[in-house]
Image: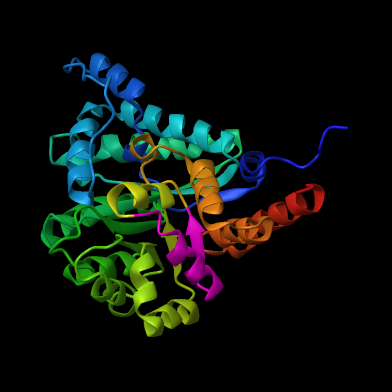
Amino acid sequence: MPSTVPSLHDFVRDLPKCELHVHLEGTLEPGMRVALAARNGLPVPDVSTPYDFDSLTSFLSVYYAAMTVLVQEQDFYDLAMAYVRTARDNGVIRVEAFFDPQAHTSRGVPFASVISGYSRAAADASALGIDVGLIMCFLRDLSAESAMATLAEALPLADLLIGVGLDSDELGNPPEKFRAVFDRARSAGLRVTVHCDVDQQDSITHIRQAAVGIAADRIDHGSNVVEDPALVQILVDRRIALTTCPLSNALVADSMKSREIVELLHAGVNVTVNSDDPAYFGGYIVDNYVALAEDAGLDDAAVVQLARNSFLGSWASEDDKRRYLSAVEEFVATTTA
């Protein structure tokens, strides 16, 4: 008689999840990159060989070069909708997605084209059963003045956003550099999250600035916090979620940081699992859950807790959180695992 126990992959795929750390520009698959280049009359890139990078800095040089094919509002819409369809197939029912307007406006693409394309896709995603919120990120290797100007341009459209974030090259660009920008965003009703990438120079200082100085609602990556138990306790006490990304960790650092992620999970930190830039790092959210579970030897209960954490760490309304968590419990109750 065939077994009714699902494989780990199928269990994770069907488990309701929220994705809290995915860059829409990082979902630009090679085929779409070629198609958009052709549509916009740009040189068609050679995508026959895999991307080559071994650090955050080398990854970013590839990443920004690839996204130059995004030119028209329709390009941003098509990119986001392609991700939404993949997320649906990965069992995602809510997404809080990053986008980087400065990476586009700096090369002459109107801000309105970026946000209009992405916001149209966010609205249309509901027909596919996915709730999408948009988080506008500032490029930390640009000036605080550039970030403030971008925020000023976005504020008249703040109802299209759920929050703001900070990403790109962390070296020499601490969160504190953008404190005034985050204060202004928060005064406009936007939530705040900050990238503190793995194994960066001054990691603990940056995590402390994000958690304490800026009072971020979430920290993206952030697994180096295990080096400071007092800071770990601050994350627990303030319910600051971490949006970890195992597969990207493995490609820009020395490992998936499974030990650190599990240690934080056991310490009571609201740890979540996400895909970061899946077109570049070899997998979407199911692949990240499976890779972490296999590498760390997680049981089904731990995997389910990570899914619960994803909703608890989201910026959804309390009513919506209860609805999402009920979906998780219903799945667990009806699944033999």
Does the magenta run of residues contain 267? yes
Residue pictured at 65% horizontal, 39% vertical: 10
Q: Can you see residue 169? A: yes
Image position of 110 (left or right of 329): left
Instruction: Give yes or no for residue 1 being in the magenta stretch.
Output: no
Image coordinates of residue 212 in percent, x first then y, are 33, 80
| Residue occupying the point 68% across, 60% down | 301
- Type of colouring: rainbow
The image shows residue 327, relative to residue 221, as above or below, that is above
Task: Pick the residue in front: 242 or 265.
Answer: 265
The answer to which image quadrant residue 190 occupies is bottom left
Quarter occupied by residue 181: bottom left
User: At which x and y percent is residue 145?
Assistant: 11, 60
Residue 270 picture location, percent across and down? 51, 68
Q: Which is nearer the eye, 137 or 296?
A: 296
Single out the residue that lies furthest toward the right.
Answer: 1
Q: Nearer the viewer, residue 295 or 172?
A: 295
Q: Quadrant of the N terminus?
A: top right
For the point 13% across and 36% down, the residue is: 107
Q: Which residues are magenta?
A: 255-273
